[in-house]
Image (cartoon, rainbow, N blue to C red):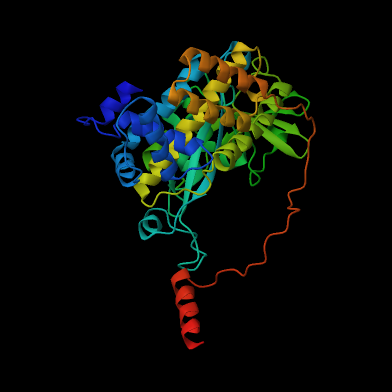
Amino acid sequence: MVRIIEAESPGARDRIYPPLVTLELFVEQVIGADQACQDAVGRALSQRTALGQPACSLNTGPYCKARRRLGVGALRRIAREVAQRSEREVARPWCFRGRSVKLLDGTTVSMPDTAAHQKAFPQNSEQKPGLGFPIARMVGLISLATGCVTQWRECACEGTGNGELPQFVGLLDSLVGTDLVVADRAYCSYFLLALLRQRGVDAVFREHQSRKTDLNQAQRLGRGDDLVTWPRPLVCPDWMDAASYQAMPAQLSVRLIQDGDYSIVTTITDPRRASRDDILWLYRQRWHIELDLRSIKSVMQMDILRCKTPEMVSKEIAAHLLGYNQIRSAMARAARANDLLPRALSFASARCAFARHQERLRHRTGKVIHEIKDLLRAIAYSLLPHRPNRVGPRALKRRPRSFPLLMVPRPQARAHLLAARKRA
């Protein structure tokens, strides 16, 4: 981590908030329940007092300037390195036949309504100006074994080339031949499957609802298990150039597995490498990424970002994912030490334990090795209950407050209220 910080922050001076201290406070800020800059500055003052250093001011300005000096590249590299280190320590039973399974999906986050954000991350085009919020799309790969975010990209939701599929194409170089990608039907594209196969990466996707496959020409491999051939589409997608389109194979052989009302498409065409039940099990694991994204957005409070500039938004996302990966890495270590699966542990409880022990480590109340052992023990204690076939309605019981919706920009509504007060 120090090596990356030094490489990304050349010539950094020894200040109250040097790059390493700023990074530590930034990550603690996004992990903690109170994500205000004032809380981060208070923690910096507490740490300096505990170490016998001169007290610093509670003014948040210097800390915010130090965050702006942090390179977003350093945050990204450290977050990926934490994920890669956790992947290297993965126990063999956590893999699928020695292969690393990557879950793929996208989500969106909103941010304050500023002119700079509206330019970089425009709001929904169907909303009137001044009534919406800037929205960023994020597409990422999450390890099924450890839960760490191994790679991601963020972009605007509006505009050509900003869809989830072209964003994932930009992540293909991070995959290796031993990886296996699992995703929903939004990614089930002929061209994406062909690009993955060129890299030796296998995929398990749900078949897209618009594709109609003729099983009369298929080769039967078993009950509900067929080998089909897809011809190359006649139209080049807008995110692919003409040369890449011509380099695509004229046809693609994939395996189609029927299971009730939906079909699973996979590039693992040999049933000896993975049976029908194996493929269905793999696709059912895709739901973990929905839970992971909920943990990132709800538990880590990343659904609504706080920073006021696009550059800081990218840093805030990277800091959230770095903190998330650190917690997931600690969960993997705790699971391995106690002969458990990381997915059997509660992320919310692990985050609380992480925040509690950060305070003790800050004041150095004991030996660091003992604090880490206590942290791993606390994480391993919070096992998730076994709840098979758990279902619930997608509905709210608690009624929202009956405030009217804001139908005009806020400054205009504020001016109207002031005018009415003056008339009264």
> Where residue 318 sits: x, y (%)?
42, 37
Indicate left or right for 168 with 298 as reference.
left
Q: Is 40 left, or right, of 275 in this rendering?
A: left
Disc tally is 0
294 relative to 152 in the view: left or right? right
In the picture, measured across the screen, residue 261 lies left or right of residue 39, that is right
Quadrant into which the N terminus falls:
top left
Residue 330 lies in what quarter of the image? top right
Q: Residue at x 47, y 14 (%)?
A: 367
Q: Residue 159, position in %: x, y? A: 43, 54
**Quadrant hosting residue 116:** bottom left
Residue drawn at x 76%, y 33% as measured from the top left:
259
Identity of the residue furthest to the left in this view: 11
Kindly identify the residue that appears in the image at 65 percent across and 24 percent down: 345
Q: Is residue 24 visible?
A: yes
Work out whether residue 216 or residue 331 is closer to the camera in this orientation and state it. Answer: 331
Residue at x-position 62% and y-position 38%:
290
Residue 317 position (above or below residue 49):
below
Residue 148 visible? The answer is: no
Which quadrant holds residue 54? top left
**Rendered view: 320 above or below 277:** below
Residue 37 x, y percent position in the rendering: 41, 44
Percent from the top left, x then y, of residue 369?
49, 13
